[in-house]
Amino acid sequence: MLIKAKITTLKNLKTEIDRLNWGILQCLQENSRESFASIGRKVGLTPPAVAERVKKMEDLGIITGYFARVSHAMAGYQLKAIITLKAFMGKLKPFLEMVVTLDEVVNCYRITGNENIIMEVILRDQFHLEKFIDKLILYGETRTHIILSDVVADAPIKKRRG
Amino acid sequence: MLIKAKITTLKNLKTEIDRLNWGILQCLQENSRESFASIGRKVGLTPPAVAERVKKMEDLGIITGYFARVSHAMAGYQLKAIITLKAFMGKLKPFLEMVVTLDEVVNCYRITGNENIIMEVILRDQFHLEKFIDKLILYGETRTHIILSDVVADAPIKKRRG
DNA sequence: GATGAAACGTTGTGGTT
DNA sequence: AACCACAACGTTTCATC
């Protein structure tokens, strides 16, 4: 039964999320502090059933964490910026080790294209930005874009169509 | 006492976050489902005191929400990309209205510089990416960078150094 | 998955500094 | 104004089916 085994494996890899789990995910993406009892009432399950499904989704890596979002501005960071970096020869690896230590970096990705790195950073003011860029220019050529406003911010993931 | 009034106003605007609240924020940024009782044990407060402080931080807009993070790949989106858009004349406003309806867009910012918009998007595969870009080119000139890996992902905000 | 009971957490009142 | 103590209520977590 090689074919059947293969199908099972593919199913496991794809980890299909059923209708009820999408309901649970929708709730938790909107408010991760909602109780399992309250979610259960919405999706039509008892609290232990919700708890079990959530635990399974955590174990499978579907749910990767629960976090509170803190206002940057309220925490004293009035400026947000996108900075790209084109690393100098031999400087990408040292940069990758250094960047994880920087409090200002909220997100950092390796990307394809002319630049190697794109970062989302939070800063107190323009003086802070200037000092921050001074650190980066040891590793590569930077380009800075100030964020003027958020159009979409951490939108929840929806069931893919198809 | 105009001066004193002004100082009070500035203090309110800055909404200073004390040591205990930073402790609470650190907990909730790591695991927003942690109970107030458990947080209280860590920071040295009773559950009602934690609840009261959290409520106040929500009301002040310091805490802006609680969210579960869902794995893009596990939800069927195998590709992540950064796309910038340089809007055609008169096409920025229509774009801003349209972009909030797109399921693929996780984050979208208005930025300074040659491009007007930068987006973080999730996609099923390269065919999905192709179809997605086709929608954008009605509004402006795009540049696409595939995300190869996450170096820093949604890092918690830390107390700014005075 | 459901049920029911025990452990745990949350929330409101009242009292202290 | 911020916190604690206590009690009522809701939630989670087991066992069992």
Image (spheres, coloured by chain):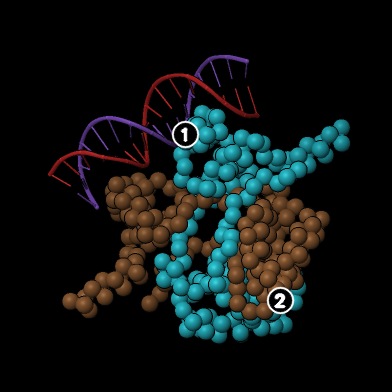
Chain colours: A brown, B cyan, C purple, D red
Pick the front one: B138 or A13: A13
Q: Which mark is residue B115?
A: 2
Q: Quadrant of residue B26?
A: top right
The relative height of residue A82 versus residue A162 in the rendered view (above or below) is above
Chain bearing tag 2 is: B
For the question of whether residue A46 can be seen, the reply is: yes
Secondary structure type for disc 1: helix
Mark 1 is on which residue type? Ala
Mark 2 is on which residue type? Glu
For the question of whether residue A147 can be seen, the reply is: no
Residue, x 76% and y 43% (percent of image)? Answer: B162
The relative height of residue B123 versus residue D1 in the rendered view (above or below) is below
Secondary structure type for disc 2: loop
User: Residue A22, how many percent across, how many down?
Assistant: 37, 62
Residue, x 57% and y 57% (percent of image)? Answer: B154
User: Residue A10, how many percent across, how many down?
Assistant: 31, 73
Pick the front one: D7 or B86: B86
Residue, disc 1: B37
Give the mark, 1 or 2, whose residue is nearer the N terminus.
Answer: 1
Chain bearing tag 1 is: B
Q: Quadrant of residue B7?
A: top right
Whether the residues at callouts 1 and 2 have beta carbons within 8 Å, the answer is no
B147 left or right of D8 in image: right
